[in-house]
Image (cartoon, rainbow, N blue to C red):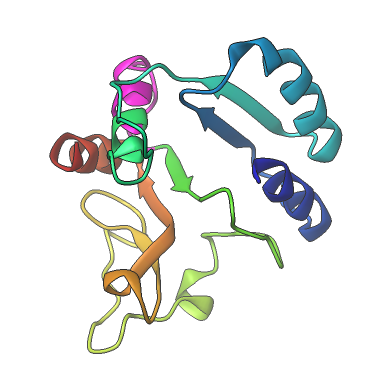
């Protein structure tokens, strides 16, 4: 499914890099997967992240927070102001995902107001998520700074 993300990102004109964080995948396919990912989307990266075991079900075993916790734990040098979006493998890009136009294209969740960190919708304690009619109302993409992600993951894990 991650290959569909790369393919749709390419067709939608996405420019920013997309990194596939793989956890629990067969490492013998890494070179082949990287080659295919980059053929589909030139700015693709594939990284194997070793995280705590989550049991037989990645989602129910908190695989995403455990993988993110390991990823951030091994990358202390990431700039805290860097913006990272968590997308899921079943996401399809219909157009470029941007954060520089949220003032005109972002909508607050029903009953809420847009919040800013200075002049940005993404900053310390402020981020962007999609809203859904299911799943508690929130879902990917989740867009936060590295600093906010580190705080979220420490509580989520």
For the residue pair 143 and 26, the one nearer the viewer reads as 26
The residue most toward the bottom is 111
76 w.r.t. 155: above or below: above
The residue most toward the top is 28
Quarter where residue 107 is shown: bottom left
Image quadrant where one finds the C terminus: top left
Q: Is residue 63 left or right of residue 21?
A: left
Q: Residue at x 66, y 10 (%)?
A: 28
Q: Is residue 52 left or right of residue 11?
A: left
Q: Is residue 25 left or right of residue 94?
A: left
In magenta, the rendered stretch is 68-81
Q: Residue at x 78, y 19 (%)?
A: 32
Tell me residue 112's x, y (percent).
23, 83
Q: Is residue 115 magenta?
A: no
The residue most toward the right is 39
Tell me residue 129's x, y (percent).
38, 64
Tell me residue 55's x, y (percent).
30, 30
Quarter where residue 150 is shown: top left
For the image shown, how many numbered marks are present on the structure?
0
Q: Is residue 75 magenta?
A: yes
The residue most toward the front is 56
- Residue 121 visible, this angle: no
Q: Residue at x 51, y 30 (%)?
A: 21
Tell me residue 57's x, y (percent).
37, 39
60 w.r.t. 94: above or below: above
Quarter where residue 126 is shown: bottom left
105 w.r.t. 20: above or below: below
């Amino acid at each position: 499914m991650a290959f569909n993300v790369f393919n749709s990102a390419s067709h939608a004109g996405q420019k920013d890099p997309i990194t596939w964080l793989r956890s629990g995948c067969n490492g013998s396919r890494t070179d082949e997967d990287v080659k295919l990912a980059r053929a589909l989307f030139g700015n693709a990266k594939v990284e194997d992240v070793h995280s705590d075991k989550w049991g037989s079900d990645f989602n129910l075993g908190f695989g995403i927070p455990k993988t993110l916790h390991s990823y951030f734990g091994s990358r202390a040098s990431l700039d805290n102001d860097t913006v990272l979006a968590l997308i899921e493998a079943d996401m399809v890009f219909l157009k470029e995902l941007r954060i520089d136009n949220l003032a005109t294209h972002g909508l607050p969740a029903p009953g809420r107001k847009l919040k800013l960190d200075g002049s940005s919708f993404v900053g310390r304690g402020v981020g962007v998520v999609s809203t859904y009619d299911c799943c508690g109302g929130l879902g990917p993409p989740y867009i936060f700074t590295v600093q906010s992600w580190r705080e979220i993951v420490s509580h989520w894990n």
